[in-house]
């Protein structure tokens, strides 16, 4: 196979975009593990004057990711995130105005490999979120285990990420005065194993916890579909029943996160690497589903609202797929 190298005369703006996305990939793939390893080494070598103050701080600060986090406007405004957004590029599309006196739960689909659209649109200050949804604050929920990583957790919270635990989502949507949006990538780690280019497979039929929380607090539900999310990486073929998928499913159940075997392009060549392809992402925010507050919803009420949500999600996909390169014969697969 002939290696296709990146040309030397690439504009500075594109080089900065590459650096921004490389940082993001390393952020998810390596930095969490490195922070844990560094902390362990400090303990092994007894640098007590470093790890004891921090672990003491960690003890008292443990629940902050479930209480709205601790965002930093300075970090969310880093120019780095503008280059990140422009790399693909990432677009946010609104289909209907939202009432800032209410709280909402955005169900984000699909997960893709690393949920680039969710991060670019709802965590950084360089998307069109503030212009399209004035008066709102978004909270992107991620796996709680990321907040178990010392020091790394502080960086995650600084860019607006919070835990996806029931307690965390409830904290956001129960805030008085409205104007708060919980963004949940509902398919989670399991869905990332179905993230293949040209496919639209969502793991949603068993995800009903968000519906119960919406009913409990009267938070409106909004389906969000991010067209292009599954086109950013190629994944090793892993159909249901294959030995690769069996191992991945078992590891996901044990560890709580999936290990998709993905690849795309490199930094200096375009044939192979962990850098995502430059594919446009169009994140479309659908129509809100009004939810009447029921403090103790029944299974039937949860099931009914869940069915309504899946129907609205399917409508959103069908209405917009033709605009963003998905063939008319392609349908949404709900698992």
Image: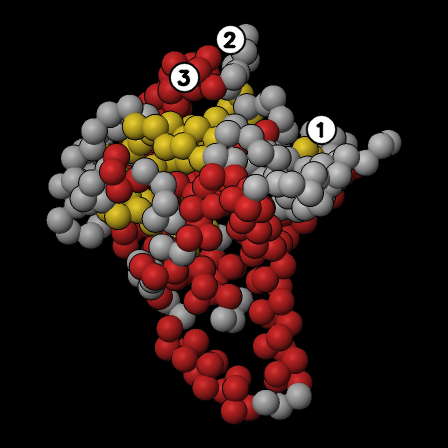
Q: Is residue 20 visible?
A: yes
Q: Residue placed at 44% from the left, 28% from the top?
A: 282
- Are discs 1 and 2 less than 8 Å apart at CB? no
Q: Which residue is mark 3?
A: 320
Q: CA gap, disc 1 to disc 2?
A: 24 Å
Q: Which residue is mark 2?
A: 328
Q: Nearer the viewer, residue 307 or 66?
A: 66
Compare marks 1 and 2 and give the one earlier in the sequence.
1
| Left or right of 243 on screen, residue 147 | left
Instruction: Residue at the far top: name it.
Output: 329
Q: Residue placed at 55% from the left, 23% from the top?
A: 200
| Left or right of 175 on screen, residue 16 | right
Q: Tag 3's secondary structure? A: helix
Q: Nearer the viewer, mark 3 or mark 1?
A: 3
Give the label on residue 239, or none. Answer: 1
- Are discs 3 and 2 less than 8 Å apart at CB? no
Q: Tag 1's secondary structure? A: loop
Compare marks 3 and 2 and give the one earlier in the sequence.
3
| Left or right of 322 on screen, residue 197 | right
Q: Position of residue 159 (x, y in %)?
A: 40, 56
Q: Nearer the viewer, mark 1 or mark 2?
A: 2
Q: CA gap, disc 3 to disc 1?
A: 27 Å
199 over 206 or under it: above or below:
above
Compare marks 3 and 1 and give the one earlier in the sequence.
1
Q: Nearer the viewer, residue 18 or 45?
A: 18
Q: Quadrant of residue 201?
A: top right
């Amino acid at each position: 196979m002939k290696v296709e190298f990146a040309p030397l005369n690439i504009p500075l703006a594109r080089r900065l975009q590459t650096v921004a996305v490389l940082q993001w990939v390393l952020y998810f793939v390596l930095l969490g593990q490195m922070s844990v390893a560094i902390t362990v080494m400090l303990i092994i070598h007894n640098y007590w004057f470093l790890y004891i103050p921090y672990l003491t701080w960690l003890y008292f600060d443990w629940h902050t990711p479930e209480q709205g986090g601790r965002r930093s406007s300075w970090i969310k405004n880093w120019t780095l995130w503008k280059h990140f957004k422009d790399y693909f590029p990432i677009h946010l599309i609104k289909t209907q105005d939202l009432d800032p006196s209410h709280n909402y739960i955005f169900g984000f689909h699909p997960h893709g490999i690393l949920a680039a659209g969710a991060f670019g649109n709802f965590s950084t200050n360089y998307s069109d979120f503030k212009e399209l949804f004035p008066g709102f604050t978004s909270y992107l929920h991620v796996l709680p285990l990321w907040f178990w990583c010392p020091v790394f957790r502080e960086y995650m919270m600084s860019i607006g990420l919070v835990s996806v635990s029931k307690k965390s989502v409830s904290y956001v949507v129960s805030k008085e005065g409205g104007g708060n949006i919980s963004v949940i990538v509902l398919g989670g780690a399991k869905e990332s194993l179905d993230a293949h280019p040209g496919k639209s497979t969502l793991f949603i039929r068993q995800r009903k916890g968000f519906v119960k929380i919406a009913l409990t607090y009267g938070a409106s539900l909004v389906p969000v579909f991010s067209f292009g999310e599954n086109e950013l990486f190629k994944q090793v073929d892993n159909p249901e029943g294959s030995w690769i998928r069996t191992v991945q499913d078992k590891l996901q159940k044990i560890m709580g996160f999936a290990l998709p075997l993905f690849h795309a392009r490199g930094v200096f060549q375009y044939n192979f690497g962990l850098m995502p392809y430059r594919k446009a992402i169009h994140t479309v925010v659908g129509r809100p589903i009004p939810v009447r507050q029921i403090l103790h919803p029944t299974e039937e009420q949860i099931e009914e609202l869940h069915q309504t949500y899946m129907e609205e999600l399917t409508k959103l996909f069908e209405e917009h797929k033709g605009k963003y390169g998905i063939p008319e014969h392609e349908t949404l697969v709900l698992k």
